[in-house]
Amino acid sequence: MLLLISGSTFQELTCVIFRTFLKKMSRLFQAPPKFHPSEWHVANKMQCASTESQKSSSERMIAESQRLVDEIEKTTQKTQSDVNKKIEQRLEEIKFWRQELDNKLEQIIHETEVLLTFKTRLEKALESCKEPLVIAQKCLLNRQSRVGIDLVHDEVEQELVKEVEVLQGVIALLERTLEQTIEQIRLNRSAKYNLEKDLKDKFTASKIDSYCASLTNNTPDVRYADNAVKIEGNFISPEDWTDFSNINVEKADKQRNNSLSLRAMIDSILSQTANDMHKQYEMVNVAFRNRVKEVRDAKHELEILLASVMDETALQEKNIAALKKAIADKEGPVKVAQTRLEARNHRPNVELCYDTVQYKLISEVQEITNNIQRLKDTLAQAETELKGLSRRQLSLEEEIQVKANTLYIDEVLCMQMRESVCINNF
């Protein structure tokens, strides 16, 4: 820009600046103005008044400041005292809920331990049902080995089938109850976990609030915390805090009551199932004893019949032997009579007479022949009877063997096997 100013203009500008400088220098070297005495007095009075006013204002400020300090000190002490009381109240609340949670935790732990013993009882009861069921099924299978007329759907078989049904029903019921018990134990442990977690949090909160209660203005480690006043979103209301613990307590009470009801039901089920199994076990045993007695009596009756048949067979054999001997004994007389007739048929001429001797000899031969035939007919009948007795003896022996087989199955295989069955009320 200076390059655009002409030379004459530059000189004029320089002169103006120099004149201005001279005027300012002349003012510096001029004598200061003189004031009137009245102005001096007024100025002093004004200084005094201004000073007094400023002093009064300062004194008021000091008094106000002291009052404010005292007021704030009292307010601070009161607020701090209120905070201390609130902390103490909070500690009491936490203590109360910790006691409640501790009591509920102790109760649920005890209840869970007791329920675990009931679970063990159910498992033992379920295990004890397996052997009686296997034995009952083996008894039914063994009794299929009965033969002949003894393969009957008798009372024993009916009671055994019923026993199998009872045992299968008991096993199904115990399995369902065991599943319910396992689920209830899980729910108890869930409630226990919630109580323990709540207790742990309250223990931590109690430690923190106890630390806060111990703090004073002279505590060495107190410090400024810029973000302490900030309320973040994860804070909950006192009502929610109370409800949270109350819900945990109520859940624990609910599960404990459910557990108590379940234990009462388990007691009832174990008692009832044991009674049902024992009752049916005795019914089967009574049926077995009655059937064994019935079969043994039938076998004994058959053995008596067999003995009588054998005796009759021996008599019949003797009778046949006597008949055969009687037939053999008649051979001599018939031969004598026939020989006599044959000899007399050789009498000469007129001596060949049909006299009384001839008549008697003919009659004798006819009589002996008829008697021999009668003896042979009787012998044939006797031999037929003997065959009938033999068949009857064989049938009786077979039937006795059938009964003996049935007795062996029922009395030896089944009843002795059932002696090992032990039904307990767990």
Image: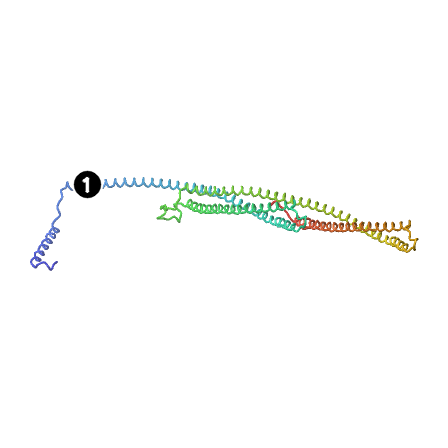
Near-viewer residue (3 or 383): 383
Q: How many marks?
A: 1
Instruction: Answer with left or right where residue 184 lies relative to residue 368.
Output: left
Callout 1: few (<14), some (14-19), or many (20+) C-alpha neighbours within 10 Å?
few
The foreground one among 121 and 100 is 121
Kindly indicate the quadrant of the structure image that contains residue 282: top right
Q: Horizontally, is 50 left or right of 168 in the view?
A: left
Label 1: element kind: helix
The amino acid on which the numbered mark 1 sits, given as a three-letter code, is Met
Say which residue appears at 57% left-offset and 43% top-offset: 269
Identify the residue under disc 1.
46
Locate residue 148, reporting x and y percent: 68, 50
- Residue 68, how many percent across, how many down? 32, 40
Q: What's the residue at 13%, 43% (across, down)?
A: 35
Residue 161 placement (x, y as % from top left): 62, 46
Residue 216 pos. (x, y %): 40, 45
Closer-to-camera residue (31/221):
221
**Quadrant position of the C terminus in the picture:** top right
